[in-house]
Image: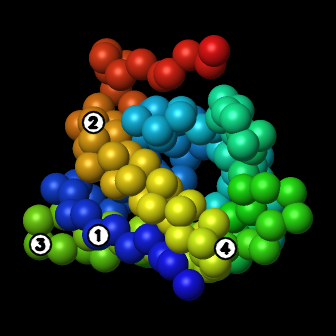
Amino acid sequence: MSEIHIVRDYPHSPVKVWRAMTDPDLIPYWTSTGKGARAVGFRPVTGNRFQFAARPMPGWRGIVDCEVLEVRERELLRYTWVGAEGETPSHVRYQLEPTPEGTRFTYHHTGFTGIGGFAMAKMLGSIRTRMLTVGVPALLAELDETGALRPDTTLRLAQPR
């Protein structure tokens, strides 16, 4: 079984990082370093079903079906991930830990099986690394201490094609 495990330290409070990761209006800003996915119907509430929706591409319909499994505000978000109809769900975990310098964020995605799963984990791992290394820091720099987007932000969302 393949997995994706990425750890990043951000010089921002857990309040700010949590909001960047879980506010449906903010998620497209950091996912725009990938395909600009929107979290449709997302709420950080156990049992909530939602979708990540992005531009379709050959071999992918542009939708990931998800269900929130566990939430501990500012600490943990776990949800299922189904990228293709009939696919066995994989599992994503966001874990936030306060550090003296800010917040340690851990992204863990497990449940990829077989050769196809290995290839998917490699592709998604590269995309997630870019999102967490480029997209999230750019967004965090544009948020105030409560996690609200500054009115004078220079960030722009990817435009759907």
The one of 119 and 124 positioned closer to us in this rendering: 119
Residue flagged by tag 1: what amino acid is it?
Val
Q: Position of residue 101 (x, y in %)?
A: 11, 65
Q: Which residue is mark 2?
A: 138
Q: Secondary structure at mark 2?
A: helix
Above or below, 151 against 2 in this view is above
Residue in the picture at 21% in, 64% down: 9
**Which quadrant is the C terminus positioned in?**
top right
Q: Nearer the viewer, mark 2 or mark 4?
A: 4
Residue under pointer 3:
100
Gap between marks 2 and 1, in whole Å?
Answer: 17 Å
Dividing the picture into quadrants, the one containing residue 61 is: top right
Residue extending farthest bottom: 1
User: Which of the two discs, 2 and 4, labels the residue nearer the N terminus?
Assistant: 4
Q: Are marks 2 and 4 in contact (CB under 8 Å)?
A: no
Which badge, 3 or 4, comes first in the chain's sequence? 4
Q: CA distance from mark 4 to mark 1?
A: 19 Å
Residue count near mark 4 (Cα–Cα under 10 Å), binned few <14, some 14–19, many ≥20:
some
Q: Mark 2 vs mark 1: give the one in front.
A: 1
- Name the foreground residue: 132 vs 101: 132
112 vs 106, left or right, is: right
Reading the image, the residue beneath label 1 is: 7
Look at discs 3 and 4 and give the one toward the viewer: 4
Residue type at mark 4: give it. Ser
Q: CA distance from mark 2 to mark 3?
A: 21 Å
The residue where tag 4 is placed is 90
Q: CA distance from mark 2 to mark 4?
A: 28 Å
Which mark, residue 140? none
Mark closest to the chain's N terminus, 2 or 1:
1
